Every structure is written in C-alpha cells, then in structure tokens.
C-alpha cells in the first residue's frame, strides 16, 4: 500500500513538474493613464487573474510616509547573486507564444514626430533582440507597429504578450536561487 501511494505521489509530482504555465500580459497606456492585466493559466483550463503588486507605505526617517515602488524592490532583489542565477536559468526556458506591441506617437511637430518614430523603431528592435537573446525564443513572429500621429501630441501604447514555461523550471530556478550563494 505504501509503495502504491509513493508511486502515485511521484507520478503526480512528475505531472506537475511538466505542466506548462502560461502568463498572459496586457498593458495599455494612453497619455499618463495606464491599465494592465496579468493572468496565469495551465493546460487544464485553469485561469487565475493576478492582481498588481501591492505597494505599501513605508515610513521614512522624518516620519513622513514614503511609497515603495515595485521597480526598487525588483532592483534590490536582482542585485543578489543567487537570484540572478535563478532568474537567468528560468529565462532560458521561457517561450514567447505571442507578442503584440503597438505604439502611436506624436509630438505636434511633424518633423520631430518623424525623428521620434525612427528612434522608437530602433528601441523596439533593440528590445526584441534582447528578448530573443535571453529567452528561449519566439514561437511566432512578433507583431510590432509604430504609428506616427503627425497632427497631435501624445503617446498611446498597447502591449499584449503570452509567455510559457514549465512548472518544473520554476522550481529548479527557485532551488538554484536558494543554493547559489
């Protein structure tokens, strides 16, 4: 009986380790107002919407409240050597299933808008090259578009991405981060 229960538990853990996890990211910024949505889904149809990282107030030295940002938390976390090794391992096993990145840009001056749009194309190409280098790769062609708005000023950004990895790689990355000091 104990052998059968152990075998069942081993097979269940093996199934969970090979289970693909999909992260869907949708982000839209229009002007200074942004909306974003994260969802985690599995192959069995389970879809879990994720909430934004909570930012709690912290008290500074003078007694005033100072907000902690997610970016500062991420920079401190990645500054530790073990976490960088775990993250590098995990990123090598992340596939990009879909990437759509649309930007509308205008400055009010058509000549300046043309220069800004050209610079934005080069930045997008650089970011895509970094994604292709550090992630496992693209399983589809990314849809990228920069639309100049010669008549008005403003910025409109739409990013939609689907990233997939296996749960076992996440566990191995956590172990690598914990034990590489």
Image (spheres, helix red, strand yellow):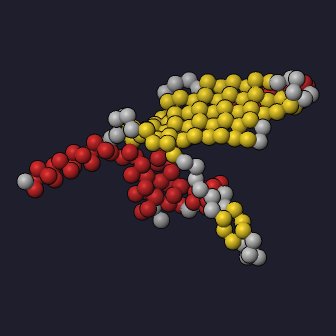
Residue positioned 58% across, 49% down in the render: 52
Percent position (x, y) of residue 134? 55, 41
Residue positioned 32% across, 45% down in the render: 17
User: On the rendered structure, is 44 left or right of 29?
Assistant: left
Q: Can residue 123 be seen?
A: no
Percent position (x, y) of residue 128? 63, 33
- For this orientation, the residue located farthest to the bottom is 62
Work out which quarter of the rendered image holds the N terminus and state it.
Answer: bottom left
Percent position (x, y) of residue 95? 48, 35
Observer-nearest of 2 and 181: 2
Observer-nearest of 181 and 15: 15
Observer-nearest of 171 and 39: 39
- For this orientation, the residue located farthest to the left is 1
Residue positioned 82% across, 24% down in the render: 149
| Image quadrant assignment for residue 159 | top right
User: On the rendered structure, is 36 left or right of 15?
Assistant: right
User: On the rendered structure, is 75 left or right of 64?
Assistant: left
Residue positioned 76% across, 28% down in the render: 104
**Number of marks in picture:** 0
Q: Can residue 35 be seen?
A: yes
User: On the rendered structure, is 74 left or right of 2?
Assistant: right
Q: Is 48 above or below relative to 116?
A: below
């Amino acid at each position: 009986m104990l052998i059968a229960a152990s075998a069942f538990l081993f097979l269940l853990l093996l199934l969970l380790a090979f289970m693909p996890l999909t992260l869907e990211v949708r982000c839209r910024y229009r002007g200074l107002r942004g909306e974003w949505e994260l969802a985690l889904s599995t192959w069995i149809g389970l879809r879990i919407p994720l909430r934004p990282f909570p930012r709690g107030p912290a008290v500074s030295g003078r007694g005033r409240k100072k907000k902690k940002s997610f970016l500062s938390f991420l920079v401190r976390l990645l500054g530790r050597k073990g976490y960088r090794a775990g993250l590098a391992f995990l990123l090598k096993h992340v596939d990009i299933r879909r990437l759509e990145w649309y930007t509308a840009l205008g400055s009010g001056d058509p000549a300046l808008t043309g220069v800004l749009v050209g610079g934005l194309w080069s930045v997008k190409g650089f970011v895509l090259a970094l994604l292709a280098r550090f992630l496992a790769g693209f399983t589809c062609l990314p849809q990228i578009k920069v639309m100049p708005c010669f008549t008005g000023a403003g910025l409109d950004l739409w990013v939609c991405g689907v990233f997939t990895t296996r749960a076992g790689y996440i566990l191995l990355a956590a172990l690598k981060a914990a034990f590489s000091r």
